[in-house]
Image: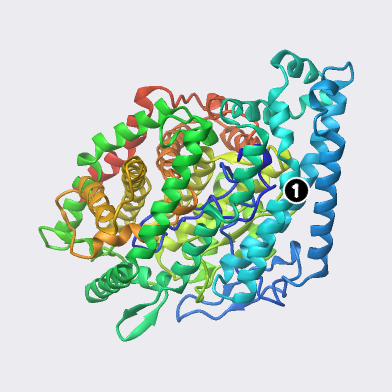
């Protein structure tokens, strides 16, 4: 079963903490990532990055000259994983993984129930879990390196072959481990509970209890093996095709041929003509490739439908809810609250923004346009670094010290490069190593917030690593909490230091836009996915039909002040979350609303809040979100909880209206 229990024992797929869809056609673009638990594994958290060129992935960290005003940008050094894709240590570790997986199967397959029932069953099983965890860590290192290398340059043939080969080796080796979580789940509850009274096994109680929640959905062993092995030529291949296709697309803007990331960045340009040209270039290229993206989307939706049907999931998003360890009714309440709030959030804000531009309506390419009165300065990389670290240090010196390591130890890859994955993410790799952050820094204010966001993930991943390979991963809902909290800290610090009234207004408006992109836009994405996956049960959807669904949810969420021009109907094509992590997107809204409530507690809290917050992050995946929120007096199951988080956004719009 593709449970989180066997996280790193899978092929390298995409990171759960990327920001590639956060704002849609704008810079702040994430799936996929993160320290999050998800149905596909932790080397599944691999939408990572550059550094791993054929021979120089571990080269000493260097800074790449960027365009004027930004300064030199750092590239990461993947040498803490491996020195390059041809490093001899990779062959050694692959052979070690193969032998240890076979030995593990020989020593334990078919023996769990009998041995765990014995008097020393707890100690015996604890030893087995420790071996399983060590293999997980090793596989996580291999898979992470392959995924980071591929995300750094997905069009290099040598890297693509390496990525595919590692994926196949991980899949083949981990086939020998499939029996373990399946057999473990068949042990009687009373027997496993008695065994966990042994301290050595009790240490793994959170992991075992988490694993057993998957029990109703696991299949017979040989079916699980078939699903596992066929994934290599199934959804994983379609994911890879999507990545390579997106990376290879080129867009004609102003006489230049651009990759997707700089093209999307033009949608935040001050020049309205450039925004329009970029939007039209995106539309033209997407249109030319619509059949490919429609085929990928249809195939993956059907693949998921088959898996869900065999496992017994009733709703199209239930597998995501299970892996997020969040109840369906909680997500339904969140979605209902956000959709009901569209008029007082996005609709109202975009009317206000149109007035600032002296228009009745804004074209869709102006949705994230800089405000006319906003400062036009490019934010250099050293300044962005200082902004984020200062904000973090004002909250917690420990938090800032951890974030500082990402800069000092070359854990960040910032330049825009052809073939590099778009957007941004933080990938945790594995506890025996450390996280890496990828972003495409271009000096925009949103880039600073993206840096704060991904470093929030990174701090979370560093703190949670102490829980070990099996219990460090965090459900997506809480993983996004850490990142959004990092953004909020940075925003509040910048706001407090900005004295000019107009620039305070621009800063506040930027934050509102970001929150709308995080909450409203992501729930619209979730509505799109639900409609697509539901309708796919009855047959394939044409590109035209997919565009109709997209336009429906976008029109509902954006409101009358945004005029959607021809060509926008195909902008669903580049959102990686739809491909790599179906129904991932609601985690952003969950995290943003939760952080709004959490930050309100912080602003009124006595000493000790920072310590409680870092303890929450350090818990990793060892506690349910409801248990982690108790020390802060928060309950996401309360129907009024989401309204409280949304009211923070509405209050900021109120303030903007007063300023206007």
Q: How many marks?
A: 1
Answer whether residue 660 is visible to the viewer in this image: no
Image spot of residue 106 (x, y percent):
86, 39
Q: Residue furthest top?
A: 190
Image spot of residue 467 (x, y percent):
72, 38
Out of 187 and 603, give the one closest to the viewer. 187
Residue appearing at x 59%, y 26% in the figure: 213
Out of 198 and 378, give the one closest to the viewer. 198
User: Under tag 1, what secondary structure?
Assistant: helix
Q: Residue furthest bottom?
A: 255
Q: Which residue lies furthest to the left in this view?
A: 360
Image spot of residue 16 (x, y percent):
54, 50
Query: Would you identify the image quadrant in which residue 543 lies?
Result: bottom left
Residue appearing at x 34%, y 47% in the figure: 525
Q: Is residue 513 left or right of residue 8?
A: left
Query: Would you identify the image quadrant in which residue 630 lies?
Result: top right
Q: In this view, does 376 lie to the left or right of 447?
A: left
Give neighbour class at mark 1: few <14, some 14-19, many 20+ (Cα, 10 Å).
many
Residue appearing at x 36%, y 46% in the figure: 522
Out of 260 and 537, give the one closest to the viewer. 537
Rendered image coloring scheme: rainbow
Out of 526 and 364, give the one closest to the viewer. 526
Instruction: Quarter of the image for the N terminus: give it.
Output: top right
The residue beneath circle 1 is 137
Answer whether residue 71 is visible to the viewer in this image: yes
Above or below: residue 442 compared with residue 589? below
């Amino acid at each position: 079963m593709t449970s989180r229990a066997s996280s790193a024992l899978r092929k390298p797929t995409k990171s759960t903490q990327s920001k590639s869809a956060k704002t849609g056609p704008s810079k702040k673009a994430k799936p996929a990532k993160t320290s999050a638990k998800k149905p596909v594994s932790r080397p599944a958290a691999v939408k990572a990055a550059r550094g791993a060129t054929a021979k120089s992935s571990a080269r000493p960290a260097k800074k790449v000259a960027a365009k004027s005003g930004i300064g030199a940008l750092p590239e990461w050094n993947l040498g803490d994983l491996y020195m390059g894709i041809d490093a001899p240590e990779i062959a050694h570790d692959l052979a070690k993984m193969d032998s240890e997986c076979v030995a593990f199967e020989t020593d334990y397959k078919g023996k769990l129930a009998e041995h765990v029932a014995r008097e020393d069953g707890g100690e015996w099983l604890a030893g087995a879990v420790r071996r399983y965890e060590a293999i997980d860590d090793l596989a996580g290192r291999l898979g992470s390196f392959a995924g980071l290398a591929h995300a750094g340059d997905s069009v290099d043939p040598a890297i693509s072959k390496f990525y595919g080969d590692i994926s196949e080796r991980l899949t083949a080796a981990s086939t020998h481990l499939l029996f373990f979580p399946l057999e473990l789940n068949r042990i009687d509850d009373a027997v496993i509970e008695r065994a966990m009274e042994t301290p050595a096994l009790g240490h793994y109680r959170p992991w075992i209890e988490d694993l057993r929640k998957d029990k109703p959905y696991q299949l017979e062993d040989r079916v699980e093996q078939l699903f596992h092995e066929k994934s290599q030529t199934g959804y994983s291949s379609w994911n890879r095709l999507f990545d390579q296709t997106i990376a290879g697309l080129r867009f004609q803007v102003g006489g230049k041929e651009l990759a997707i990331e700089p093209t999307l960045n033009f949608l935040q340009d001050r020049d309205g003509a450039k925004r329009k040209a970029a939007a039209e270039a995106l539309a033209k290229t997407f249109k030319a490739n619509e059949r490919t993206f429609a085929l990928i989307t249809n195939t993956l939706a059907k693949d998921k439908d088959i898996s869900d049907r065999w496992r017994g999931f009733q709703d199209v998003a239930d597998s995501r809810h299970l892996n997020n360890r969040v109840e369906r009714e909680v997500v339904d309440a969140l979605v209902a609250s956000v959709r009901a709030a569209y008029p007082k959030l996005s609709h109202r804000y975009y009317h206000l923004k149109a007035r600032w531009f002296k228009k009745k309506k804004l074209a869709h390419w102006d949705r994230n346009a800089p405000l006319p009165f906003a400062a036009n300065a490019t934010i250099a990389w050293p300044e962005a670094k200082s902004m984020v670290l200062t904000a973090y240090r004002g909250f917690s010196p420990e938090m800032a010290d951890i974030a500082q390591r990402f800069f000092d130890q070359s854990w960040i890859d910032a330049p825009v490069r052809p073939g590099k994955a778009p957007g941004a993410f933080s990938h945790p790799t594995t506890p025996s190593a450390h996280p890496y952050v990828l972003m495409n820094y271009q000096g925009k204010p949103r880039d600073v917030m993206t840096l704060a966001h991904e470093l929030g993930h990174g701090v979370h991943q560093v703190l949670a690593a102490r829980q070990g390979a099996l219990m460090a991963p965090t459900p997506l809902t809480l993983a996004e909490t850490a990142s959004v909290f990092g953004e909020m800290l940075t925003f509040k610090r910048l706001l407090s230091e900005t004295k000019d009234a107009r620039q305070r207004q621009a800063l506040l408006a930027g934050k509102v836009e970001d929150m709308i992109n995080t909450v409203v836009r992501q729930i619209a994405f979730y509505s799109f996915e639900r409609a697509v996956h539901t309708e796919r049960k009855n047959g394939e959807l044409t590109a035209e039909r997919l565009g109709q669904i997209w336009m429906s949810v976008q029109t509902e969420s954006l409101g009358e002040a945004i005029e959607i021009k021809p060509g926008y109907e195909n902008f669903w094509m580049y959102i990686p979350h739809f491909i790599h992590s179906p129904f991932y997107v609601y985690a952003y809204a969950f995290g943003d609303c939760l952080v709004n409530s959490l930050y309100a507690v912080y602003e009124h809290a006595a000493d000790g809040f920072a310590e409680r917050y870092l303890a929450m992050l350090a818990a990793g995946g060892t506690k349910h979100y409801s248990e982690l929120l108790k020390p802060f007096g928060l309950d996401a199951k309360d129907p009024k909880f989401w309204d409280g988080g949304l009211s923070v956004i509405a209050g900021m719009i109120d303030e903007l209206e007063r300023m206007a």
